[in-house]
């Protein structure tokens, strides 16, 4: 699924990017993300800082979805642009967002 | 012109870079004068005087059981103990260094303990050498001269130590404690270096994640250190080297879920106790050495010539 096609209530795309979103992984532990995220996954997390983008890029994540309506700072967006990663903000918590995301993805 | 003050931390990191891959074995004095417990304080004094040395280890079947320093000899003179056996007046509980340890451990030991020399032991805990600050200074000056010589011949580029003529990429990154902003620079560069060389994506990911874990480790857990990337045709070698505090129980640190991270590190999404086990799992070769108060050195090697696309399911 393309970033532009991913839509559910409370979700806002603040930086679309080309890579296809093929799955998802929900975690706030970046070490866990590094051990388990699969290429093409969207990372669903509350860790809205630059290291999240670094980890997402290392693992080949297609997108990052920040939960709880976290404010995303410009340096995070800049890093995401450089790494070709889509950035979304969701007003829901990790659980709600994951459920809505799975539904939207048709899983 | 006033001299430029370099921050102390910067200098110590530069020194650590110079120490590079040297081990204590490479710099120690192998010709060691040692005495047994039954020798007298006067015997020791004679050996010291004749050989211009200021500290002698006391051994029992090659194991270090004490040290006699000039200070101990002076006390013996004062107290009229010169005819006594060294066993009665030697300093016990001597701290030894292992010949296998990185040179940086010895440097940390000198800055943390008041001793002027350390006996060096092998794996069987037998005395094999002595190391003083002079040994370290000589080794660092030699390495500095070597680097200057290569910079002159190669137009300013510092090359890795000899015996690495197939080296494609070599760089050392400095990492400071809690500087999370700098975390990821080495791994990003590693990823790019491997990508342009057409390395399989899975292999790139393994190497880059191992590198990132080691970067974060230095930033989150050490007093600061360096990370060196070395790439040749066959493998990526990542060496993380820090100034301490060292890991008291390496086996425990290698256990998934064990972590000493503080709340702030955890709030950043790290400190789940997965870093070291993760790095080991991703590496084709992995080695860790740590000395309490001295530092930790971790080496991770990822082979590039594997048929990764076919056999990577287990990684």
Image: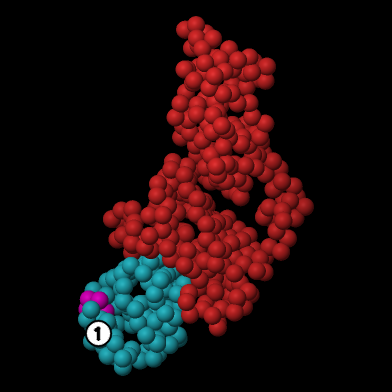
Residue A53 rendering spot, x and y as whole percentages: 41, 71
Residue at image position (56%, 15%) is B40
Number of residue marks: 1
Give the chain coloured cyan: A
Residue at the spot x=47%, y=59% of the render? B214
x and y, in percent, of residue A49 in the image: 35, 66
Residue depicted at 54% across the width and 73% down the height: B204
Q: Horizontal and vertical percent for residue B128?
A: 61, 36
User: Residue B31 sits in which quadrant?
Assistant: top right
Residue B245 lies in quadrant:
top left
- In the rendered image of the structure, the colour used to display chain B is red
Kind of element beneath mark 1: helix
Q: What is the x, y in percent for residue B41?
A: 55, 14
Residue B43 counted in the magenta span: no
Identity of the residue drawn at 29% across and 61% down:
B267
Which is the main secondary structure of the residues drawn in magenta? loop
Stretch in magenta: A90-94
Question: As displayed, is residue A89 above or below residue A5?
Answer: above
Please identify the residue farthest to the bottom as the structure is shown.
A106
Q: Chain of mark 1?
A: A
In the image, residue B38 sits, relative to residue A73, either above or below, namely above
Asked if residue B37 lies left or right of residue A101, the reply is right
């Amino acid at each position: 699924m393309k970033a532009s096609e991913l839509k559910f209530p409370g979700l806002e795309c603040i930086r679309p990017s080309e890579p296809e979103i093929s799955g998802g992984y929900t975690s706030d532990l970046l070490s866990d993300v590094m051990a388990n995220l699969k290429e093409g996954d969207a990372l669903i997390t509350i860790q809205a800082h630059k290291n999240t983008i670094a980890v997402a890029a290392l693992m080949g994540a297609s997108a990052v979805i920040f939960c709880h309506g976290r404010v995303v700072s410009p340096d995070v967006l800049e890093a995401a642009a450089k790494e070709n990663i889509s950035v979304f903000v969701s007003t829901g918590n990790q659980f709600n967002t994951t459920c809505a995301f799975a539904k939207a993805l048709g899983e | 012109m006033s001299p430029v003050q370099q921050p102390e931390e910067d200098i110590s990191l530069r020194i650590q870079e110079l120490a590079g891959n040297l081990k204590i074995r490479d710099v120690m004095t192998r010709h060691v004068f040692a005495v047994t417990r039954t020798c007298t304080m006067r015997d020791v004094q004679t050996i010291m005087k004749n050989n211009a040395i200021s500290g002698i280890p006391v051994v029992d079947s090659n194991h270090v059981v004490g040290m006699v320093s000039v200070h101990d000899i002076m006390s013996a003179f004062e107290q009229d103990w010169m005819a006594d056996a060294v066993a009665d007046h030697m300093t016990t509980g001597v701290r030894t260094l292992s010949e296998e340890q990185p040179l940086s451990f010895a440097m940390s030991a000198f800055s943390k303990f008041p001793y002027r020399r350390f006996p060096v032991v092998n794996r069987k805990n037998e005395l094999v050498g002595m190391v003083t600050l002079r040994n370290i200074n000589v080794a660092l000056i030699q390495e500095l001269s070597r680097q200057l010589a290569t910079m002159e011949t190669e137009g300013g580029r510092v090359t890795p130590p000899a015996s690495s003529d197939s080296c494609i990429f070599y760089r050392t990154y400095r990492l400071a404690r809690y500087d999370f902003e700098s975390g990821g620079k080495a791994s990003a560069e590693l990823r790019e270096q491997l990508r342009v060389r057409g390395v399989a994506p899975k292999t790139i990911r393994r190497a880059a994640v191992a590198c990132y874990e080691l970067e974060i480790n230095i930033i989150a857990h050490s007093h600061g250190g360096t990370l060196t990337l070395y790439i040749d045709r066959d493998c990526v070698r990542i060496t993380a080297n820090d100034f301490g505090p060292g890991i008291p129980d390496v086996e425990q640190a290698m256990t998934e879920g064990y972590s000493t991270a503080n709340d702030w590190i955890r709030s950043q999404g790290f400190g789940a106790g997965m870093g070291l086990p993760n790095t080991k799992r991703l590496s084709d070769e992995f080695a860790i050495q740590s000395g309490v108060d001295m530092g930790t050195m971790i080496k991770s090697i990822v082979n590039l010539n594997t048929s990764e696309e076919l056999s990577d399911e287990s990684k």
